[in-house]
Image (tube, grey):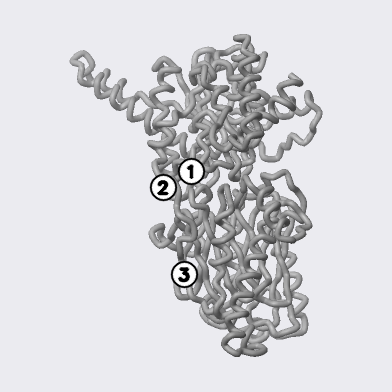
Amino acid sequence: MERLEHECGIVLIRLRKPISYYREKYGTWRYGLNKLYLLMEKQHNRGQEGAGLVSLKMNAPVGEEYLFRERALGTSGIADSFQALNQVIDRYLVNTEATDEYVERHLPFAGEIYMGHLRYATTGKAGAKYLHPVVRRDNWKAKSLALCGNFNLTNVDEIFDEITAEGQHPRDRADMHVVLEQLGHRLDREIERKFRTSKGLDHKGMDITNYIEDHIDVFTPLRECAETWDGGYVMCGVTGSGEMFVTRDPWGIRPCFYYYDDEIVVVASERPVIQTVMNLTADKVSELRPGEGLKVTKANEIEIKQLREPKENKSCSFERIYFSRGSDRDIYRERKALGSQLVPEILEKVDYDLDHTVFSFIPNTAEVAYYGMLNGLEDYYNRIKADLLSQPENQTIEKVQEILSKRIRFEKVAIKDIKLRTFISEGNTRNDLAQHVYDITYGTINRGEDNLVVIDDSIVRGTTLKESIISILNRLGPKKIVVVSSSPQIRYPDYYGINMSRLKEFVAFRAAIELLQEQFKEGYIREIYERAKEAVRTGESYKQNFVKEIYKPFTVEELNRKMIELMKPKEVTCDVDLVFQSIEGLHTAIPNHLGDWYFTGDYPTSGGTHMVNKAMINYYENDYKKA
């Protein structure tokens, strides 16, 4: 019910044939551009703050541009970027025939390599300046570099200190700009090594340049830099001389998939995106494994290599629960499993009274988990029916028909009004508008008699529930509202790509603090703060997550009851209850994506642990003292 923002979506394309090949086979030289557009649009869910793209022309004559970029802010960033590049192309073709030779050598954005990016900001940086791809230009093509990424690093400040200690002077501290300078510096050193080798072979002039471009190994600087990165990342890049590369973090936190044949290499953040655009079955699309790198050289050779030793599997489970497209075959199955596993606890909350319970879902991202919940309920009902039918007194035609006619009651109780935007920031007015974001379907439940169960994929801040959802559902007059989350309680910030970084944002954390205050344990809260602060001071904060101590005294059910108090509007008189997925249920449903730090506080990297302790300090000093 509350939108989480996520960084980001990536696309890489390498055409492995001359542009004339695609015009002859597919009827257009725009084959690569068209694939780029589709791959970006199919990942629009991954970033709506802006978009950008780069095109590399490998055969541009000396004196002409070879690296082209467009970026645009806003939800229409993809369309705006392509509109801008089309205007550039149209100007070049006004009085010129688009022959194969002209397109390949001179036409902007008609390249062999394409890189696209969709952005959700998680660092607080906004504006066109911070859109990817970022570019580092040089008169030596091999030293020119364009980068984009789906990443968040916990140690950008340390990387900044490292490169400035070597004499660099970055003009920005933004993570992507810092990484660009770090990797650019290492790329320069790799080129200098090749330069010395070439000179030793008595090469001169263009022979040196050609030797460097033909022999450069972009994996060398990429590995050197990646060894210093703490966080979740899929980092992509293109050099001016025609090296394309991508690498994934060794914990597998951020996702990356690829496909290649003799015509094209494609990399994207999600498997079904590649399947749809390239018309492939799932088995044809591969996942880049944790710590691996993929590169395509100037000579069009593909290499996949382990750049960092893989760590414990911590692939982001939120990708499976919420972010990635549900059209992926495995994600669809996993989300259904998340819903079906909640059935036993849901039944307890409604006293097993299915005759007087209506099931629904809010928002649309929870729809697949809803189907899984219905499947689980139907299985339960079928067992009940079988038991009833086995009893002698129920074997008359009338009784059999009565038992078989029983059905799970499901309705579409709320429909989001996509035209309404709560853009007014003034509190009371905004809250009033928020209560009209959803239209409810009147007559779907019997007033005062029926329970209403709605499933969501996650509950983070609780503000949407409090300001709109519960009040809206209450208009239907249910006896009881049960809000179900297909994910466990979100208790901890994420530092690897999801936009939730402050402790006070989590309703679970606020509930724990209130429970401690009710028990007169302000001193306990202060003790946790002081331990975290001392650990940061001594450098021990990378080893232990002290925020876990905030939750330690309480059961899930105790936190649930306090969260209901915090989220239930005063005007709602019916009972409200919560059901959360268990950690065990999460891993049963999603066995191959074990990243769960936002639920458990078990961060895969030491940098994440350090950051959560800093978050506790920030909360206590900036928020708790004001309360």
Residue drawn at point x = 65 percent, y = 88 percent? 206
Q: Is residue 563 toward the left or the right of residue 625 in the image?
A: left
Query: Disc 3 vs disc 1: which is toward the camera?
Result: 3
Q: Give the residue displayed 36% in from the left and 29% down from the top.
A: 378
Q: Which mark is residue 303?
A: 3
Q: Which residue is outermost to the left?
A: 392
Q: Earlier in the sequence, mark 1 or mark 2?
A: 1
Q: Image point 74% across, 61% down: which residue? A: 167
Where in the figure is residue 627, as x and y percent of width and height? Answer: 74, 19
Q: Which mark is residue 416?
A: none
Residue 401 place in picture, x, y as percent: 29, 23
Q: Can you see residue 465?
A: no
Q: In the displayed image of the protein, which residue is found farthest to the front?
A: 538
The numbered disc on residue 330 is: 2
From the viewer's side, name the closer residue of 24 and 204. Answer: 204
Cα–Cα span, label 3 and label 2:
27 Å
The image shows residue 238, relative to residue 541, as above or below, that is: below
CB-based contact (under 8 Å), mark 1 and mark 2: yes
